[in-house]
Amino acid sequence: MILSAVKKKILIVVMDGLGDRGCKELNGLTPLQATDTPNLDWFTRNGIAGTCDTVDIGIRPGSDTSHLSILGYDPLEVYTGRGPFEAAGIGLVGRPGDVAFRCNFSTCDGNHNIIDRRAGRIDKPDTTELIKSLNGMKIDGIEIIIKESTEHRAAMILRGPGLSPDVTDVDSHGEGPLNWSKGSTKEAEFTAGVVNKFVKETYDRLNDHPVNKRRSAEGLLPANIIVPRGAGSFPDIQPFPEKHCMKAACVAGVGMIKGICGICGLDVIDLPCDCTGGCSSNFVSKAKIAMETLKSYDFVLMNAKAPDVCGHDRDPMLKCGIIKRLDEMAGYFRENFRDDMVIVFTADHSTPCSLGDHSGDPVPIAVYTPGNVMDDAVTFSESGCSHGRIGRIRGKYIVPMCMDLADRAEKFGA
Ligand SMILES: [Zn+2]
């Protein structure tokens, strides 16, 4: 009897915004090139390596579009705007037909002219209290579901027949009069009408709200209107477990990443840590959770947000420090490695410190599983990984490549 090969498990470790460009503070090196990373190098030396354009060559990805790619989807086909992904990130997972928006709590005068787009950077618990007075609203037969997010932000879902996401933002992105929403098709016109009625209704319900009276008495700006923007529909995508025949989960702190994974049908693992990802959280404890999760799942995606924040803050020294700690995390994976797994170390995009934002520079990728072909790459960096046999890959091919290494791919042909 011939025993078929054991199907391995797959763990993808996404180090958010890890890729960079040469920094003058580091004598022209990238933070990865300038930092000693013995554990990441071990995986690179013993595994296969390359560079990755997560979406495509020259495209500057958001964390949402790049994670869709890393999960094996083509964001150019399935991405429907930030609204639905942010909504899902705070627990509002809608269904096809729903339209989602990102919203701000703002301050306006009696004529709906915006005085402060962020209502003095209001935050919980005031926003939680204010949202309660908006729950259960129905306008022209459309159900409105709204939830507060971090600071002045909220997300909203419209649910009902005949909606369209092709409506303009009410948010004028500045002070002064609102841009009342418009749409050019029948459905979009109807949707814009619902949105505009909703905005006026929020003013009527919030202006005299006790929380706002208290804020005004304390000299704080009242949050007396909700202003939506970024309409998008929930993508009708094939769930990841069905598409790839793998039970899948994600270990992430950032709301948007959790939202993407949730929309793609991955189980979102609750983290005990209250860190939402912006802080330099304890990578090793996250790695432990990922390894624990892998015991009952076939596929786990883990996201570590901190390097991206250093790039946005234009701080290469801090990024080097974070990389050092990411390497300790890789050390944990090395010590606790199980032979029945395929591990991937990569990034969702580059966030060069010199740019302070995402760029289209390809990111390093190293993949290791016992018995893989060892290639010529020996160090984990933008340049070091380019010596490997993966070459230059697109993000959406990472999962298929790993499925083959994990002996999960099916034979094509006889
Ligand atoms: Zn970023």
Image (cartoon, grey):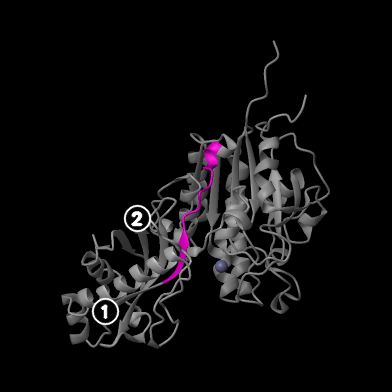
Residue 224 coordinates in the image, percent (x, y): 26, 79
- Residue under label 1, please give it: 224
Q: Nearer the viewer, residue 209 or 342?
A: 209
Could you tell me residue 227's position as x and y percent? Answer: 36, 75
The part of the image, by quadrant, that contains residue 195 is bottom left
Query: Residue drawn at (52%, 63%), measured in percent from left and top?
Result: 81
The residue type indicated by label 2 comes to Gly
Q: Is residue 385 above or below residue 402?
A: below
The picture quadrant where one finds residue 53 is bottom right
Quarter that holds the C terminus: top right
Taking the image as shown, residue 41 lies to the left or right of residue 103, namely: right
Given residues 92 and 101, the one toward you in this image is 101
Q: Which residues are magenta?
A: 229-242
> Tag on residue 160?
2
Q: Quadrant of the N terminus?
A: top right
Residue sitting at the far front = 186
Q: Which residue appears at 65% of the width and 67% of the height? A: 60
